[in-house]
Image (cartoon, grey):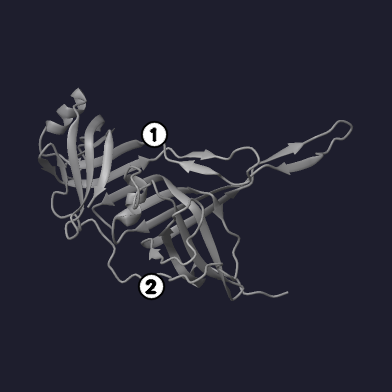
């Protein structure tokens, strides 16, 4: 039997999201918003199971399913800070990791549009990375209650799907000159990366096939950057593990800023080489006690 193969060029509705009122339940009449300029999405479905054996046979007896586990990874270029906030800002209601999301996309399978819904999704890790040669790149890993099997019917009552993105993705120049400020001192960077983990606890009580709870717990926040050398202050702060207030400007037009509390750098690396023809840089990394994206 012949069929028409599919590919990314047959995606009809780019990944889009809506905030859930009840965990794992997509609003019946949702108004979706675009997640960003999505470059990659990876769907990971795992069926927890146990392979049983019984005496008197060399071969397995039964393979028994005891749940379903769903994750996906999303890589995108942002046009605003909304999706980043769902993985960065502390659980405090709308627009933070305190709210779960439903995400939707569709793709032709054998010439017929099929919908996929990701329900009860929360960001587990969020990487925001900016280099001097390209756009801002965000990579988020999500855990979720369920990822539907592709279906020709989306199952929603009166959805309003998001339109095509017209805005230009944020790039390395959106944050303006000298985007990093540490203790009131500004710096030129070749690269900046911050990673926020929300410590999601996945709870699937006895008798449940899917997750019943997916709650953020302990946060981890790491910072990694390559800085052009202009003084010795940052190296001295690293040696003393001095805690500093820091900000990184993502977009000057919308005044979008990453706010870092008690940034403590604990690693420093720099190389001098007789064959180098590059301006000197140093690499720093560490962590902070709190982070938020505003406005």
Q: Where is residue 126 in the image (x, y as percent from the top left)?
A: 37, 46
Name the spot of residue 20 as percent of width and height, x first: 44, 55
Looking at the image, which is closer to me, 111 or 215? 215
- Compared across the picture, whether 122 is left or right of 181 comes to right
Find the distance from the CA under tag 1 to the CA under tag 2.
Answer: 36 Å
Tell whether label 2 touches label 1 (CB within 8 Å).
no
The quadrant in which the N terminus is found is bottom right
Disc 1 target residue: 218
Dot 1 lies on which element?
loop
Instruction: Identify which residue is drawn at 31% across, 37% down.
Output: 222
For label 1, count other residues whose C-alpha is less than 10 Å away and answer few (under 14), some (14-19) or many (20+).
few
For residue 174, side relative to residue 117 (left or right): left
Residue 285 visible? The answer is: yes
Could you tell me which residue is drawn at 35 percent across and 55 percent down? 83
Residue at 82% of width from left, 39% of height from top?
61
In this figure, which residue is indicated by the disc labeled 2?
163
Q: In which quarter of the image is residue 199?
A: top left
Mark found first going from the N terminus, 1 or 2: 2
Task: Give neighbour class at mark 2: few <14, some 14-19, many 20+ (Cα, 10 Å).
Answer: few
- Asked if 52 appears above or below 179 in the picture, the reply is above
x, y percentage for residue 122? 44, 48
Residue furthest top as drawn = 240
């Amino acid at each position: 039997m012949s069929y028409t193969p599919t590919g990314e060029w047959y995606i009809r509705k780019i990944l889009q999201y809506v905030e859930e009122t009840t965990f794992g339940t997509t609003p019946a009449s949702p108004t979706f918003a675009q997640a960003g300029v999505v470059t990659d999405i990876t769907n990971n479905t795992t069926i927890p199971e146990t392979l049983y054996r019984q005496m008197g046979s060399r071969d397995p007896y039964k393979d028994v399913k005891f749940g379903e586990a769903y994750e996906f990874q999303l890589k995108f270029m942002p046009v605003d800070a909304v999706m980043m906030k769902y993985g960065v800002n502390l659980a405090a209601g709308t627009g933070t990791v305190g709210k779960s999301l439903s995400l939707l996309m569709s793709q032709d399978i054998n010439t017929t549009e099929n919908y996929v819904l990701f329900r009860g999704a929360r960001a587990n890790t969020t990487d925001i990375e900016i280099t001097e040669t390209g756009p801002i790149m965000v990579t988020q890993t999500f855990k979720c209650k369920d990822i539907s099997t592709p279906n020709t019917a989306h199952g929603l009552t009166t959805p309003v799907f998001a339109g095509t993105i017209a805005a230009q993705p944020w790039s390395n120049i959106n944050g303006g000159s000298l985007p990093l400020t540490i203790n009131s001192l500004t710096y030129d960077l070749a690269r900046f990366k911050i990673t926020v983990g929300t410590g999601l606890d996945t709870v699937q009580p006895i008798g449940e096939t899917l997750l019943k709870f997916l709650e953020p717990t302990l946060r981890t926040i790491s910072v990694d950057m390559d800085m052009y050398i202009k003084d010795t202050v940052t190296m001295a702060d690293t040696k003393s593990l001095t805690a500093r207030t820091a900000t990184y400007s993502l977009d000057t037009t919308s005044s979008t800023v990453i706010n870092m509390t008690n940034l403590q750098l604990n690693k420093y690396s720099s190389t001098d080489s007789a064959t180098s023809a590059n301006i000197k840089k140093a690499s720093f990394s560490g962590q902070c006690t709190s982070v938020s994206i505003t406005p």
